[in-house]
Image: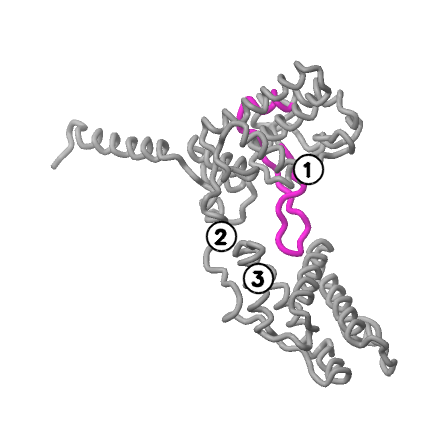
Amino acid sequence: MGRDGHVPGSARLHLIDGLPLLRPDEQVFEAMIKGWRNQQLARNLSLGYVDDQERTVRAFIRHADAMPWQWTPQHVDEWSADLRAVHGCVRSTLRNYQGSVRQFCDFLTNPAYGWSDECLRHFGTHPVQVVYDWNAAAHADEAEGEPERRAFTRPELEAFFDHADEEVLRVRDKGRKGWLPAFRDAALFKVAYAYGLRRNETRLDLTDFGRNPEGREFGEYGTLLVRYGKAKKGSPPKRRSVLTVWHWTPGTIEEWISEVRPGMRHSPSRALWPSERGPRIGVQRLDSRFAAYRDAVGLDPALEFHSLRRSYITHLIEDGHDPLFVQQQVGHDHASTTAIYTCVSSDFRTRSLRRVLDATIEAALRPGRTS
């Protein structure tokens, strides 16, 4: 309970009773937003999530050119059409935006918070729910990603990494200092693939590596602690520990940390990937560097940074690793999610079928078989 027994987000906590408002439209709306923020924070939702929710509602206000107590389902229809046709929002983004407006309306129309009474007193009308099942995007499919997104084939991945290494040599041969960040980017892409990392999960520190008692051959780099795993809505980042799988991984990390990273300007920081101008590289930069390398090799434009993660999952499955192990490595709660990411090659399917056929024929020809 808040002040005087009112729940967080209550109108009585944000509007002084009996005090006339100089700009009632603006003041009541800002009080609603402040109340909604407090209600969400009281639910222990993350500050970043709450900020995103507020930005979405403010964007809807600007498009509708109407206050919440004036909203109608038609405003939602027009806004949604604009998001899809003009701004090109994908299905999941549109659904999330609509969900934010729906939650805001749920908050305003809940009698416990008193906002309907306040609007009736000031404006002679009250807010209503304007986002319904019949005018909102449905979550009809687990895999809502763009269908052209896929994993690298093994030759494509080899070509991509080869180009990243050649870029280091090319810049260094010209005597430029830029070879250090080029080396960093090449190592970062390899580590992202080696552990199946999302872009934000590459925010690593030097202390995030450790030994694996069952994998002594990997030395100091047998495990990786991912501290910025994908969070559920309103929750803090989800941590997980990822085991090193490929024998080339420790050498790549050791070379970067011991031989190259000390030459970076901000190497005294604890960040694994320092930038030229700050203690840590910004994750937004990774997309542009990835795209530059991909385009230079002439690879499919559908390949993106997240394709490294898709490739990790796919190649582990193709190499015969247990699906449950792969699921735990990448931090998926459900096996069905891992299955969505798995893009096994036609060659792998052909070899799998060949093994089954060979086993069937061998069993049929085995001596002593009765008909």
Residue 334 against residue 116 in the figure, above or below:
above
- Name the outermost residue toward the right: 19
Q: CA distance from mark 3 to mark 1?
A: 35 Å
> Sequence-wise, which precedes: disc 2 or disc 1?
2
Q: Which labelled disc corresponds to residue 82?
A: 3
The quarter in which the C terminus is drawn is top left
Q: Quadrant of residue 102?
A: bottom right
With respect to residue 301, does 212 lie above or below? above
Residue at 47% x, 47% y is: 335
Mark 3 element type:
helix
Residue 8 visible in the displayed image: no
- Which comes sooner in the sequence, label 3 or label 1? 3
**Which residue is located at x 28 percent, y 34 percent?**
356
Q: Amino acid at mark 2?
A: Glu
Residue located beneath label 2 in the image: 144
Ranked by sequence position, the earlier of labels 3 and 2 is 3
**In the rendered image, which residue does mark 1 sit on?**
203
Alpha carbon separation for disc pair 3 and 2:
20 Å
State the residue lying farthest toward the front.
86
Q: Residues within 10 Å of mark 1 (few under 14, many from 20)?
A: many
Q: Secondary structure at mark 2?
A: loop
